[in-house]
Image (cartoon, grey):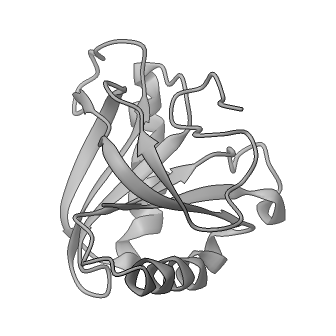
Amino acid sequence: MTSSLPLILREEPFFEATEVFLPEAVQVATMEFPEVRLDDLPEIFDGHFHEIAQAGPIGPGFAVYDGDVSDEFDLTIGFPVAGPADVDGVDNCLFPTGRALVMSHLGGFDGLGSAWELLMEMHFARGGAAPRAVVEIYVTDPSVIAHDDLRTDLLVLL
């Protein structure tokens, strides 16, 4: 069963790494942050997701990580929107499309590192090359869902 909200790929979590085709032409409002480190993420997320939300989200927030997350990488955060946003500092573009390997992480954000390790291990065991980028889709809203009940879908873009 597919959800009616953009970027929720299905209602039930992906308990195993599953290859999916990402939907095409999903309009998103985003902000880009070049050359960031993992330590910068709380400040970026806390300080900028609310700005992007002025564009009128119609689905969950997401983050695209491009580069080596153990060092410096480029980060794009955003939300799917119904149409182009007219918000200062917010860009309009399309969500990445194509094939992806997806697995859900259930629980707090502090467990994302080990979830990513597991997904990347499975990706490489399947013969996967270094991904072009990785994505987190924050399926549940941390402002209304208990920390331990959060769901984040992790995607390796193939």
Whole-percent x, y for residue 46 in the image: 49, 54
| Tally of marks | 0
Residue under the point 53% across and 22% down: 58
In the image shown, does 63 or 118 lie closer to the viewer?
A: 118
**Image quadrant in which you'd find residue 103:** bottom right
Residue under the point 63% across and 69% down: 109
Q: Establish if 158 lies above or below 88.
A: below
Q: Establish if 49 lies above or below 83.
A: below
The reply, left or right, for residue 55 in relation to residue 119 is: left
- Which quarter shows the C terminus? bottom left
The reply, left or right, for residue 98 in relation to residue 46 is: left
**Image quadrant in which you'd find residue 23:** top left
In the image shown, does 11 or 91 lie closer to the viewer?
A: 11
**Image quadrant in which you'd find residue 68:** bottom left
The reply, left or right, for residue 8 in relation to residue 148 is: left
Residue under the point 40% across and 55% down: 100
Q: Establish if 76 lies above or below 155.
A: above
- Which quarter shows the N terminus? top right
Residue under the point 37% across and 26% down: 26
Whole-percent x, y for residue 117 in the image: 50, 85
Q: Establish if 128 lies above or below 48.
A: below
In the image shown, does 144 or 100 lie closer to the viewer?
A: 100
Which residue ends up furthest to the left in the rendered image? 34
In the image shown, does 90 or 3 lie closer to the viewer?
A: 3
Whole-percent x, y for residue 16 in the image: 66, 68
